[in-house]
Amino acid sequence: MQRAKPFAGGLGVSPNFFFSPKTGGERGFINSFVIRKHLVLYSPQRVAEMSLDLNKVAGQIEGMAADLKAEQKDKEAHLSHALEILRLKSNELDSLRKRIENSKTTWLVAGITNELTGSHKSRECPSDFAVIAVDGSHIDVDRHSAARCCLINIGSVVLRYGEKPDAALRSQPALYASRQDLTIADPLGSGEQALERDLLGIKRAVAEAEALAELCEGIPPQLPALALLDGSLIMWGLGGQAYPDYVKRELLENGFLQALNKIKEISQKTRVALASYISFPRSTDVVNALRVALCPYDPPDCDRNCSRSVPSSKKVCEAVDGVQDSAIFARVLGPGERSATFISRSSVVQKHYGDNEVRFFYLKGDEEIARVEFPRWAEERGLVDLIHTLILDQCRRGQGYPVALSEAHEQAVVTGSDREQFQYLVELALSEKRLPTATSAKSRSKKTRWI
Amino acid sequence: MSEKIGEVIEASTGQFVAECYELHSPPPLGSLVKTSDSDVEIYGVVCNAATESVDPGRRPIARGKEEATEEGIYRQHPQLSKLLRTTFDILVIGHAQGDELYHYLPPHPSRVHSFVYLCETDEVRRFTQSLDFLPILLGTKAVAVDEIASACLRQASCAHDDKRTFLVKAGKEVAVLLSGDLNRLNAILRRIRA
């Protein structure tokens, strides 16, 4: 690919670009210059070659930054307000719990366990322990390919610390190509769903949990151990009416939850805890509990009291708009501390999860606030402190992110060139069997870009 | 028969690369190793060793600031030993077919995944009875070729009963081959002084 040539004299862009209506003024000029200095290093010929015209987008990006800056002050005020409500309501937990039970909100509200503002230090790390982590990636069904198939790659890691340190890193791909593999069929009817896109992502999450459960079987009974997954334990994609019941049964009850139950059974005879780690969480469950606390209506009912068709509604809860849970706990928690535990009241959890009801706490690591989710049985077995301690230890070894998860990711990752090799192997296998390897005209036109 | 120390991962007529089975344990620079291509045994001199990440896109970072010992780093991060590997490069200087030794390049390179063995003392002595491999060693385009040649001769001398005699003989041979380059000759002679 030809390198961009520095443009010797003058600027390679029209002067109009420096005075965008949104930014304007001197500061706008300087901001424009900062973004556009990257563009002036390209000669006009090079700029013309790019299919995305960054000159046209630069102004819009600056506009976005200016809007965010303007919102900053409001955000600070909302955050202070939210912190105040948090402190006030920490002594009125019973009434808040009742309000939450009776409320009908359009947003997800966290369930309160026994405290709101508690912050807990981690315990001392056990001298000998194990951490197991699983991550996955997949190659989706290629609509333009001659052979219909998809691939799920599961990366797993078992790390032993203490007297006998050891590590086992493994990657296990699975090809799904048969008709049964590529569809989820209704056992009692004639309906079926293709395993691709979102559903394939869900299937992958199930495969990760199953792999994790299998690895937990190998843990000695007396050894404290943490089984870790990346992302949320809540199968958001299977909530609501997105998929028919037979799909939910296959992937949730007989899939993901069955794997969690297996880990629960293993945990009854060992000291294995299960958790998942969400980096940079954008959730607002706890802030939404503060919205319920603020609501002047009893019980809070968003649709009835504050719908857009009701002009006289007073949305008092707007006072905490834009505040995320992580912002709150960044202020409340000290380094290495975790928050109180909260309950996920999402409908899929409440309807299907039973003993595996997802609970969570926020953790202040060295680099970020993370959300750690775990099943109710882990809290009931007193494993929350172990989860807290081991995750913090993992983040310290992993430069801010649990090292077991980043190594599992490395084992699972499928790069662009892996994908190409995979497609090549598929075509090779087909052509060796004298099967047609024709691909679609659209796919060919993308690969050979002619004028 | 000595234990295998590595496995060929790249092979060409004049050299091959092997990965060690044990991290951080390559054979010493200049030592004589052998591998095989079914009926032909291929002899070579270790000319380089490296320890690096298995995945070329990942690089090790310093982890020992809080550790008292280097072993402590590997204990605290047990995955490190699985993510690094040690490889060594070998210059081919001869081969054997049956009982006959030849101090020139073999007809075929070794096969990938052949085992690599460190030559035992008698084998080193037998192979270095003749110094006919020196032209290949001194004429190669490898980096620091004189270091490698000196290391090879020092290692080989340990297999002979009279080290000094061997090194003097080697020195004379090198002098003939490098008569046109006194600087190189002196550099090598200084490195093989007994």
Image: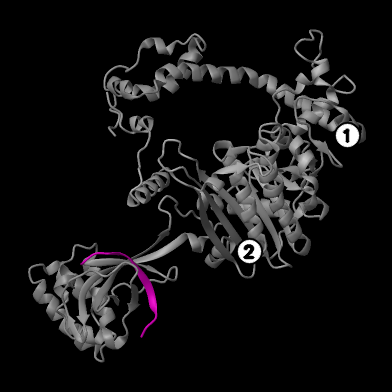
**Residue of label 2:** A161
Q: Is the residue at mark 1 from the same chain as the one at mark 2? A: yes
Label 2 crowd (10 A; few <14 / some 14-19 / many >=20)? some
Nearest the viewer among A32 and A426 is A426
Query: Dot 2 falls on which chain?
Result: A
Q: Is residue A434 above or below residue B169?
A: above
First of labels 1, 2 by sequence position: 1
Q: Which quadrant, please, contains the N terminus of chain A? A: top left
Q: Read off the magenta span.
A: B1-13
SS label for mark 1: helix
Subunit under mark 1: A
Quadrant assignment for the C terminus of chain A: top left
Horizontal side of B19 relative to A338 (left or right) equals left
Q: Name the image quarter holding residue B54.
A: bottom left
A149 versus A105 height, above or below: below
Question: In this rendering, would A69 be left or right of A109?
Answer: left
Query: Which residue is under mark 1?
Result: A97
How far from the left and from the top, in percent, is residue A127?
69, 65
Please give left or right for residue A226 compared with residue B153 in the image: right
Percent x, y of residue A95:
92, 31
Position of B105 relative to A445 (above/below): below
Q: Amino acid at mark 2?
A: Tyr
Q: Residue furthest left?
A: B180
